[in-house]
């Protein structure tokens, strides 16, 4: 997927949130704590972008104040949380004209085995009341996500491109993934434990041994466009 996106931009000077294929990459997060855990790379510069930061400050931090200088903007599993009008305004200022591309993607399902998939479907139904309404974009596969950009052939507004992302995942990795869910946190604040020891034991029962690493397929979707 990274290679496909890199192939869409005629220049490879600066990307916001993608590595390997560009001379410079800027990774950003609203959480300073999250950035402490970011993987270090000689081409990547990480910046803290709290909600209070202005659009002009973002342009300065990402592109040194140079508008229309970013080749590629990507957002993985997060754009549904954004203030979309504000974010898209910033993207229009930053993207190179012509040639700049924005791509957003996410996933809302994981396929492992029939027993596991059925259990996780039931678990998801219990989590739904605790999700923020903004997450509805995610559960609808970004089909209803506003995306006012010209298609580049990798999904467009109302018609995301379907993707399958294959990964190896340990049981501990799975638990970490489940515990990171906003619904789990919200439920806990309300006195509901969605990942009790009983639930974890049930999940492990359909996963297999606690040290077992399994092949999983994330059902993902992407929208990509240009100005």
Image (spheres, rainbow, N blue to C red):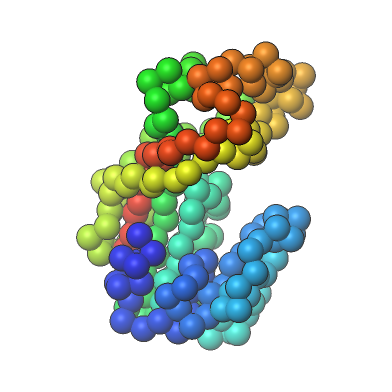
Which quarter of the figure is the N terminus placed in?
Answer: bottom left
Closer to us: 101 or 208: 208
At which x and y percent is residue 66? 53, 85
Query: Is residue 208 placed above or below 11 in the rendered structure?
Result: above
Q: Residue at x 32, y 47 (%)?
A: 163
Q: Is residue 73 left or right of residue 156?
A: right
Q: Is residue 132 visible?
A: no
Q: Residue at x 51, y 19 (%)?
A: 206
Q: Is residue 205 left or right of residue 137?
A: right
At which x and y percent is residue 148? 35, 58
Q: Residue at x 47, y 36 (%)?
A: 214
Query: Is residue 64 placed above or below 90 in the rendered structure?
Result: below
Q: Residue at x 60, y 78 (%)?
A: 42
Which quarter of the figure is the C terminus placed in?
Answer: bottom left
Q: Is residue 7 visible?
A: yes
Closer to us: 97 or 210: 210
Query: Is residue 207 placed above or below 153 in the rendered structure?
Result: above
Corner quadrant of residue 64: bottom right
At which x and y percent is residue 111? 40, 32
At which x and y percent is residue 191? 77, 19
Q: Residue furthest left?
A: 153
């Amino acid at each position: 997927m990274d290679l496909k996106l890199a192939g869409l931009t005629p220049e490879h000077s600066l990307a916001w949130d993608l590595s390997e294929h560009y001379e410079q990459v800027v990774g950003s997060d609203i959480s300073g704590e999250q950035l402490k855990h970011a993987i270090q790379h000689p081409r990547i510069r990480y910046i803290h972008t709290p909600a209070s930061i202005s659009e002009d400050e973002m342009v300065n931090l990402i592109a040194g104040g140079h508008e229309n200088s970013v080749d590629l903007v990507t957002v993985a599993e997060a754009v549904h949380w954004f203030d979309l009008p504000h974010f898209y305004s910033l993207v229009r200022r930053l993207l190179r004209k012509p040639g700049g591309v924005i791509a957003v993607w996410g996933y809302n399902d994981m396929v492992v085995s029939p027993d596991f998939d059925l259990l996780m479907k039931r678990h998801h139904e219990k989590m739904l009341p605790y999700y923020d309404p903004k997450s509805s974009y995610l559960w609808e596969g970004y089909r209803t996500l506003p995306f006012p950009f010209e298609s580049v052939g990798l999904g467009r507004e109302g018609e995301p491109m379907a993707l399958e992302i294959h990964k190896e995942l340990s049981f501990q990795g799975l638990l970490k993934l489940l515990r990171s869910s906003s619904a789990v946190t919200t439920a806990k604040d309300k006195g509901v434990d969605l990942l009790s020891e009983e639930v974890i034991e049930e999940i492990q029962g359909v996963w297999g041994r606690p040290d077992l690493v399994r092949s999983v397929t994330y059902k993902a979707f992407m929208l990509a466009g240009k100005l």
